[in-house]
């Protein structure tokens, strides 16, 4: 799914008057070491690169299912995003998150929130790779598995959220090492 979406983006971007480049596909970033020396790493999907904007992006496929109150669960999330205090809608399926920490609390969906934790980590890699390149925001693209619709949620990364995530990884390993459970 990810490679297909990237190819579609590349094809569309080439036809633009001021093309957007796709860079750093599957580039490995390093975040920190756990207490036992294990290095936490991850691979970014891509960076969208233009004269004006530089954005690290992640592509997630999402199944659509029945909803008790809406046509589908996709429609239900669209409505929710459109009415959230921490979100500004700027296109049919495009959203800007004004405060990532507050957004995750308002979203109240630990499974979807995990996507934001992951992408937020990429921004704060230990070598400052993305920040040194001028990347200043991030974006999750959700691809609807049923009908190929795409949703875009952009956000400014949060260093506080990165630190919280790092601390959680460290605490989990410490507890496992101490309890052997």
Image (spheres, rainbow, N blue to C red):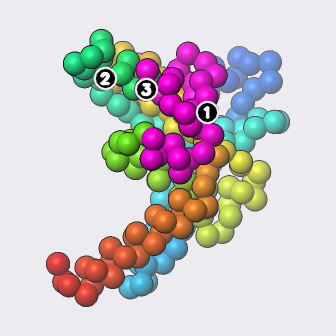
The circle on residue 4 is: none
Q: Are marks 1 and 3 in contact (CB under 8 Å)?
A: no
Q: Nearer the viewer, residue 9 or 80?
A: 80
Residue receiving disc 2: 73
Residue 174 location (% of width, % of height): 33, 82
Q: Is residue 100 magenta?
A: yes
Residue receiving disc 1: 96
Q: Would you identify the image quadrant in which residue 49 lies?
A: top right
Q: Earlier in the sequence, mark 3 or mark 2?
A: 2
Q: Nearer the viewer, residue 123 or 102?
A: 102
53 is higher (above) or lower (below) than 37: above
Residue 158 location (% of width, % of height): 60, 55
Count of numbered labels shown in the rendering: 3
Q: Would you identify the image quadrant in which residue 38 lies?
A: bottom left
> In the image, which residues are magenta?
79-106
Q: Would you identify the image quadrant in which residue 64 lies?
A: top left
Residue receiving disc 3: 80
Mark 2 residue element: helix
Residue 118 location (% of width, % of height): 47, 53
Residue 7: tell me if it is visible: no
């Amino acid at each position: 799914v990810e490679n297909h979406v990237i190819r579609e983006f590349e094809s569309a971007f080439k036809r633009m008057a001021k093309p957007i480049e796709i860079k750093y596909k599957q580039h490995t970033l390093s975040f920190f070491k756990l207490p036992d020396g294990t290095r936490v790493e991850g691979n970014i999907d891509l960076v969208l690169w233009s004269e004006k904007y530089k954005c690290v992006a992640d592509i997630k496929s999402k199944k659509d299912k029945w909803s008790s109150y809406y046509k589908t669960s996709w429609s239900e999330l669209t409505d929710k995003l459109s009415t959230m205090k921490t979100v500004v809608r700027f296109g049919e399926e495009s959203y800007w998150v004004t405060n990532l920490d507050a957004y995750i609390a308002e979203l109240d969906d630990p499974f979807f929130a995990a996507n934001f934790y992951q992408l937020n980590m990429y921004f704060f890699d230990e070598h400052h790779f993305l920040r040194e390149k001028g990347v200043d925001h991030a974006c999750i693209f959700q691809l609807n598995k049923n009908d190929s619709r795409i949703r875009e949620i952009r956000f400014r990364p949060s260093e506080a959220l990165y630190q919280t995530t790092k601390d959680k990884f460290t605490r989990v390993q410490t507890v496992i090492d101490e309890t052997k459970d």
